[in-house]
Amino acid sequence: MKDRGNTPIVSDERITALIETYGSDISAYPEAEQGAAARRMAEAPGLFAQALEEARRLDDVLNLVPEVDVPASLRNSLIAGAPKAARTGRAQTGFSRFLPGWLPAGAVASLVMGLLIGVNVSLPASVANADTNDEADAVMYAALGFGNYELMNEAAE
């Protein structure tokens, strides 16, 4: 937002947020907001006095902490070990950008399940024609939901 003189205007809430984020030193604020924040603080010094005092106390405490010298090799190894953004190998054009990446895997899983169910459903008819009365077959068919295996054998005879 800008005023009639085409200079940026910063709200009081934004100035308070800048003080809480960057401290009491206006030169640490983003360049685009430094001038407007300095003008507004000069216009109403009492409005920001408490926030500036708290920021000054925190700045003083932080200045007591010694600066840590991080070796370049440690810094470079930390940056190299940071997680990288995942890149997708799929083309993001046309209709494919609306499809989720797992869709082909879901289609294959659906096909496999359909084949397994089809084989298991067709299996009782072929086994019933083979005249087998094996107890293991009866257990398998009962587990698959074909509890009337005996009736199937009687109908085949």
Image (spheres, rainbow, N blue to C red):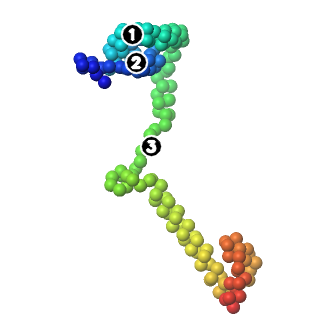
Q: Quadrant of residue 43?
A: top left
Residue at mark 2: 12
Residue at mark 1: 44
Residue sitting at x 46%, y 59%: 104
- Amino acid type assigned to the residue bearing label 1 in the image: Ala
- Amino acid type assigned to the residue bearing label 3 in the image: Ala
* Marks 2/1: CA–CA distance: 10 Å
Q: Secondary structure at mark 1?
A: loop
Residue farthest along the bottom direction in this orientation: 157
Q: Is residue 4 above or below residue 99?
A: above
Label 2 or label 1, whichever comes before in sequence order: 2
Label 3 or label 1, whichever comes before in sequence order: 1
Q: Quadrant of residue 12?
A: top left
In the figure, is residue 147 to the left or right of 52? right
Q: Secondary structure at mark 2?
A: helix
Residue sitting at x 48%, y 10%: 50
Q: Residues within 10 Å of mark 3 (few under 14, many from 20)?
A: few
- Amino acid type assigned to the residue bearing label 2 in the image: Asp
* Marks 3/1: CA–CA distance: 49 Å
Q: Residues within 10 Å of mark 1 (few under 14, many from 20)?
A: few
Q: Is residue 101 above or below residue 75?
A: below
Q: Is residue 100 above or below residue 15?
A: below
**x, y percentage for residue 142?**
71, 74
Q: Is residue 116 above or below residue 103?
A: below
Circles 2 and 1: CB distance less than 8 Å? yes
Residue at mark 3: 86
Q: Secondary structure at mark 3?
A: loop
In the figure, is residue 102 to the left or right of 91? right
Q: Quadrant of the N terminus?
A: top left
Q: Quadrant of the C terminus?
A: bottom right
Of residues 24 and 97, the one drawn nearer to the viewer in this rendering: 24
